[in-house]
Amino acid sequence: MKGLNGKSIVVTGGGSGIGEAVAMMLGEAGCSVTVADLNGEKAKAVAQAITDAGGTAQDISADVSDEASVKAMVNAAISAYGKLDGACNAAGVPQRGKLLHEVELDEWDFCHGVNLRGLFLCVKNEIAAMLENGGSIVNVVSTAAVVGFPNGAEYCASKAGAAGLTRGAAVDYATKGIRINAVLPGGTLTPMLKGAMEVDPGLEPALAAVHPMNRFAQPTEIAGAVRWLLSDEASFTTGASFAVDGGHSAV
Ligand SMILES: NC(=O)c1ccc[n+]([C@@H]2O[C@H](COP(=O)([O-])OP(=O)(O)OC[C@H]3O[C@@H](n4cnc5c(N)ncnc54)[C@H](O)[C@@H]3O)[C@@H](O)[C@H]2O)c1
């Protein structure tokens, strides 16, 4: 794909699911990938898979809800590869599968601490590293930003915030060479969705039924859209909420 080879790109949540698929695709496209995850072992395995396939990657254990950790992640990319050209922010946590009146404050804070506060910390520090040379940031949000999920109001709120943060930041940096977009995946077969379906057995049929394609995505189907938005082919796209959801949000 045009305009990806040689770019230094960070992927948060890169150890699993959508982030893992993005990291692998970027490695194949000739990027230098910094695979960041709270689970350092998973990040290490993905970075190893990229280098085993002939690509360039490093791993780092990082907690997106901790600013010192986020700064260390950005600095690791710059130290290893001399610059930061892009970021895919895929780290996230799911809903508890509860009605809102049953959600405890610490559960709300945990969800928002990763999905919204953590995203703010990542986007803030990634932008700071891109001010001189420009770049592209893609936030992995969710159709939950625009559609109500049963038993997931705290998750919907965090993802709606993430989409709003994306739009607001995109406007502020549009003339500074930094593009900021959101991908809104529908149900995607990752460890997160499989885990949520185990906790809430009603989720699988309910979720499948609201996707007009009547199936869930594979992580690579989401990663392809992220890859395009990170590339120079998307040079006129910023502030977009790009649905990759089998028609879920079109209903
Ligand atoms: N799977 C779906 O159906 C689906 C749909 C829409 C949106 N999403 C979003 O896509 C993103 C990726 O989800 P996934 O399905 O690939 O899940 P996943 O659980 O497979 O991967 C998420 C990764 O994020 C990491 N992570 C969690 N908290 C972190 C933290 N504080 N700091 C750093 N890393 C952290 C986890 O260790 C994990 O490796 C999430 O933001 C999720 O909300 C997923």
Image: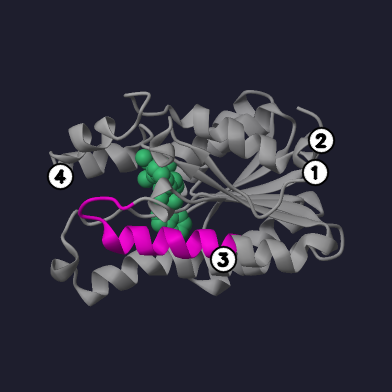
Q: Specify the quadrant that holds the N terminus.
A: top right
- Gap in Å between the C-alphas at discs 3 and 4? 29 Å
Residue located beneath label 2 in the image: 3
Amino acid at pointer 1: Ser
In the rendered structure, the answer to whether residue 87 lies left or right of residue 17 reads right
Q: Nearer the viewer, mark 1 or mark 4?
A: 1
Q: Secondary structure at mark 2?
A: loop
Residue located beneath label 3 in the image: 165
Percent x, y for residue 132? Answer: 86, 64
Percent x, y for residue 227? Answer: 65, 36
In the rendered structure, the answer to whether residue 93 lies left or right of residue 55 reads left
Amino acid at pointer 2: Gly
Q: Specify the quadrant that holds the C terminus.
A: top left
Q: Is residue 162 magenta?
A: yes
Q: Which disc, if any, is residue 235?
A: 1
Q: Which residue is located at x 63 percent, y 23 percent?
A: 53
Percent x, y for residue 228? Answer: 68, 35
Q: Secondary structure at mark 3?
A: helix
Residue located beneath label 4 in the image: 200
